[in-house]
Amino acid sequence: MDNSAIQTLEAAAQVLMAPPNLVTSEQRHQAESVFLEFRSTKNPYQLCREILEKSTTDCVLFEGAGLIKTALIREWNMLSADDISSLREYLLSYLLRREVPTYLKEKLLQTIAVIIKRGSINDGGRERRALLDELEKIILSSTISQQKLACSLILAIMQEYAITVKSADVGLIWEVHFKLKKSFEGQDLKRIFRFTVGVLEQIVRSGHQPEGEQAALTKQLLTIVENILCWNHVSPLLSKRLIGAFEAIYESDTAPALRLSLNWRDTIIQPELIALFFEIHMYVRNNPDLLNSSLTCLVQLASLSGVVVSASNLKQQYLENYVNSFVRILGFIQPSEREMLGISQIYRRLVQFFTAPMIASTPPAFLQYLTQYTCHCIRGSVIEEGINDDTVWRESLNKFLHTWSSIVHDADGFSNETLMNPCIEIFNTYLQCRLAPPDGTRGHESSDGCNNDIRDDMEEDERQLHSNVLLTIGAIARKAPAHCCHVLHTLLTDRSKRLESNLQLMHMGKMQNINGGEQLVTLFEDLHWILMITGHFIALDCTEGETVTIPTELVEYSVAQNANVDASLRYLVGETTSTDNVDDILKLVGEILRISSYECAALEAGLAAAYSPELSATLSWLLKIWSNAYLTLQPPNCSEVLEAAFGRGSRGVSWVVGLAARRAAATLRHLAAQPPAARHALALLATLAYPHHRENPLASCEEFLALIVWEANGSNLPGELRRELHRVFAIAATFAEGEERSRLLSSTIALQEKLMNIINTESDTEPVRNALADTLDCFIGIAEGVLEVGTVDEQFVLLMGALDKIPGIIFRYHNYPGVVLPALNLLAKSAKRMLHSVQPQNVTKFLEVCNATFEVYMRWNSGKISSIPQDAEEEAYEVNILTFCRHQTKCTRDFYNVLRASFIGC
């Protein structure tokens, strides 16, 4: 074809790229037809060469380059080896002698890579090796622009072989793709690695700074090495879909561990290689464009594992070589933010892939720098919290804390003395960053993130927001229990005295100035952080209903103290302030309970408006996780002192439960408008009511039982919290007996009476519908709280009384989603508990309610078309709930049919 074809394509491209107001749709359609016809051209290679040489239109150049690749794949079997080789040589020559746009260069490089990969099926990789020889010569002797091009082609070839799921479709089956990948790995991957590392060594030794074109070349060489060290070695036994899933994880998260075959052993474990990579890092670390690639290489080398270091002595020697080079450069640098993130990843990988005894055998500087950088990141992350536009310090801190978590939980090889001082330093640093002067530095930096923790309305729960960090800080602190107990007790004692004094002044009306208010806020925030840290130190946070024990380190520490039981108990209940021969754990618990009592007294004295809801929530959270581990202790899970205070049947348990229930009740009454405080108070009551606390006297606690009367008389709790309160009543009733059970069930009876009064009312106003929805929501709480049903089945009978009314409620209020949704939700929640009933007639009754509800619902919703778009989601939710109920009902019916048949057969 002559130049007219190129001119036609360029004219069509101008039409396609023109603004809509300058061309008609018919002209655009004709232009599209030109390119569609062009893409189907057979044997287009000469035409495409003419386009590459003569055209100046980007669109035409791109289409021409794309057609070469498409036609190659389509016509591969019809082309001779000489034609293919000639085309490859032309494309490489074209790129070497011309400066072309990036998009065109990448397309042509990929085409060359496809030719190499497709041809290696028949030649066993001969052309690939010949091309690599040529590229190596270019990199060693040509201009920088040609060197960069050669590096780009190597990267394109690696990309074509590496990610087999995303490789170009060259008409090959999956097994061939995988076979070619394995061939490339075995023949050329190590060769490329050794050559590239050698070139990088020459650049480093040259003394030229990595700037301009030199930096760009270094970047490409580092990228090649980075890709090799991150190479995804996937087992051939996995399916294509699974390998695709692995690759998706790899691309979105960290690279896989460096697992190399035996033929890499002569290269990868050489001490000189490790030292060179750290030397390369020192060379490029001040260039932001090169820093990340360098750090990635070091991180990957820190994860070396597999058969290449399967021998224990090799793995130990490799770790020694790596750590020696690592700590050597740490002695010469002050890491930047981004560099610190890489260093934290290196520490994490080393601890993750090498055994604890190996890590313990590293030089002392290894642990010293880990401690120093962890403390540095703690300070940086606290300041960063107030900025909220970057998370580098927090990410680095999380990595360092993950490392510490592994060390303290698997300290094999580390002596207590070796870990104690670093753990104390980290604990002290974190504590100081969270406390106000003079004990800490909070607020010292105007931009730090803990200046308004108490006063601001937090969208996220403060205790949940910092839980991961505090969990590790608590584990670190337990490696030095004597020091941490002393520091925390000193701080708690000081702040509790200040709290008592300030609350007394407020009660007497003597604290009305601005400075006094600011001091109180500072005090609240200090207590908030001290209590959160103390909570994670003395206990482990857990999900509701989970049983945990006292941390082993604290049990051992309590036993080792051999404190006086009588003195410890007297201090716990506040009969004495002397701490002589008092157990350190009970010192902390005593101060926590005193602070709890001060809060309770303040709320009951009418000081709720001046009290901190965040502090109240934190105190409830602490009492919850503490009571979950410490109440009703049994040997050998505790010391003599702890058993005397909180063992099964001890008076201390009754006393503590009474205090906790009274405080929770005060919180619900006076801080009901503060969701965090009320929600955590209810969580505390739920924990005390759970089955593993069946010997706890919560069910007989008058402070707790008084809440039943308060709720029945019309509490001021929002609907969600009322639902949770009834769930707590139901949990407690499940395991209560006698009069206490009757009193707890009276809350359900009162709720049932309220439901009947609403249903029987003639009025159909919005307040009535809201009251009905709220009452149904409370019954949902009861359904969720019925954990275990006995032979009497009283709770189930009461619940059935409400469920029986659901068909009628839906019939009457079918046009009000605010009522229909809670009704259907109650049915769904109750279905989950239905199998607990041992009375067949109750199950049969429930099935009848489900069927009646379904019929009513279908009557009013069959063929219904909503005119309100926002109702669509609610209606879909209703259907989903109902479908769930029907499905569970069917399964239940089948189960009982089989069960009854088996009984009849017997």
Image: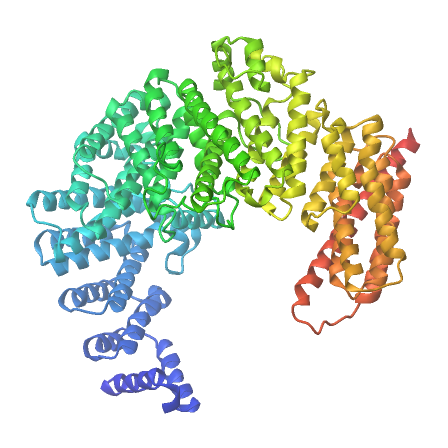
The one of 227 and 117 positioned closer to us in this rendering: 227
Horizontal and vertical percent for residue 630?
59, 22
Q: Looking at the image, can residue 670 be seen?
A: yes
Q: Quadrant of the N terminus?
A: bottom left
Q: Quadrant of residue 277?
A: top left
Residue at point 30%, 87% (across, down): 11
The one of 149 and 286 positioned closer to us in this rendering: 286
Residue at point 64%, 43% (across, down): 670
Horizontal and vertical percent for residue 787?
74, 35
Instruction: Give the side of residue 43 with respect to residue 790, left or right.
Output: left
Instruction: Give the side of residue 372 with respect to residue 22, left or right.
Output: left
The one of 550 and 180 positioned closer to us in this rendering: 550
Q: Quadrant of residue 75?
A: bottom left
Identity of the residue furthest to the right in this view: 904
Instruction: Give the side of residue 688 with respect to residue 642, left or right.
Output: right
The one of 258 and 582 positioned closer to us in this rendering: 582
Residue at point 86%, 44% (across, down): 800
Residue at point 37%, 67% (across, down): 74
Horizontal and vertical percent for residue 341?
31, 42
Instruction: Give the side of residue 144 with respect to residue 893, left or right.
Output: left
Q: In the image, is residue 733 above or below residue 647?
A: below
